[in-house]
Image (tube, helix red, strand yellow):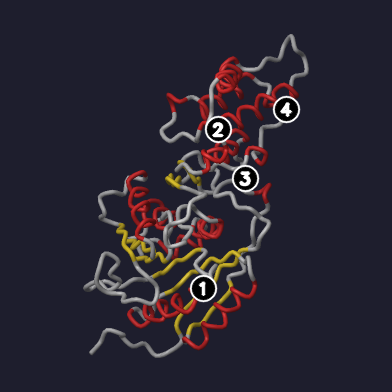
Amino acid sequence: MNNLSAVERLKRQYFQLLDPEQLTLPPPEDLRLPEVQTQIFDDLFNELRLTYSPPERYKFRVLKRIVGALGEAIVDPDEDEISDDLSSSLAQYISQSLLSASAAAQQKIFLTYTAPTPSPNAARVTLLEAPSLLASSGTTGFRTWEAALFLGVFLTSEQGKSLVAGKRIIELGAGTGFLSILCAKHLGAKYVLVTDGSREVVTDAKANLHFNGLQDGKTIKVGVLEWGHALIGGAADCRQKDEVFDLVVGADVTYDQKSIPALLATLRDLFELYPKLQVLISATVRNEATIKSFLDGCDPNDLSLTDLNIPLPSSTSQTGFFIPVSTPIRVYMITCTGEAKDPFAP
């Protein structure tokens, strides 16, 4: 587990709001130790120590599982005890009325994503999300999808950091802004332009900058950019005086086959502005036909595509940016092979 303590791993999973049944609890011999129970309460449930707390219904479900596991872990009832703090907190939740599951699903909630490094000071990104909501445009940008987390895992590797540090970056279809915030706050990006086609999603992404201390706008900016539309003018102006963008990132931007032609047109326009640009696309393979449509569209647009063949880590080996392993995710590097031409030149 890369020297990550069992409680720290549980804490990272908890604040990412993994399903309570999927949380990795410390082994019974550790769980029954008073000091471990104290750390679990302080790190997960002590409201005096928490800035962004999970929703009440989620905390209740996790507490219920932990206290149940504690009951099973006890070997000697005269020696082993369940923490008063944990049992009292559970009793309090049992006695109060909680939102129904359907009502809770409509709420915006805080999630904190921790980078997969053993350091207790690992990079963290806190986002306000609405996982069950759709924007009026039909987009699903109110939640962070697994392809973004997988690309985040790659970007926090040494190879990934070298692509980001000191570079100017554009994110397409940014949604919650997870990747942009990670690059701007933790990976040394010089400047990040966060774009999405939905005004509602962009509004929420701006709020997420604030939660991560990036509200001054010096190294990161958010704006609406609709694929297939002009790249200059407006808040998401992709052509800036005397500056060149180096990298474009996009996660789960290939899920809708109808939007792929517009996405390819935008990528081609960006390459015509910045011929040496590199593009990283992370794609969850839910439908092979949709992915094939994107891949087949690259060559006619003079786009060279390479599958980086990044292995998906097993569930047991993951220490941060936790990702479901049921569906494959691919990361592609795209460059331009054709003659560069500025689409805005007279």
Picture disc at residue 57: 2
- Residue under pointer 4: 28
Labels 3 and 4 touching (C-beta < 8 A): no
Q: Quadrant of the N terminus?
A: top right
* Residue neighbourhood size for the residue with mark 3, other residues' Cα within 10 Å, grouped as few (<14), some (14–19), many (≥20): few
N-terminal label among 2 and 3 = 3
Per the image, the residue denoted by label 3 is: 2
The reply, left or right, for residue 337 in relation to residue 237 is: right
Q: Residues within 10 Å of mark 4 (few under 14, many from 20)?
A: some
Q: Secondary structure at mark 1?
A: strand
Mark-to-mark CA distance, 3 and 4? 20 Å
Spatial CA distance of label 2 from label 4 is 25 Å
Mark 2 residue crowding within 10 angstroms, few (<14) / some (14–19) / many (20+)? some
Residue at 59 percent across and 14 percent down: it is 84
Kindly report the distance in space between the C-alpha atoms of the residues bearing marks 4 and 1. 44 Å
Q: Which residue is mark 1?
A: 333
Gap between marks 2 and 1, in whole Å? 41 Å
Percent of width and height locating residue 43? 51, 29
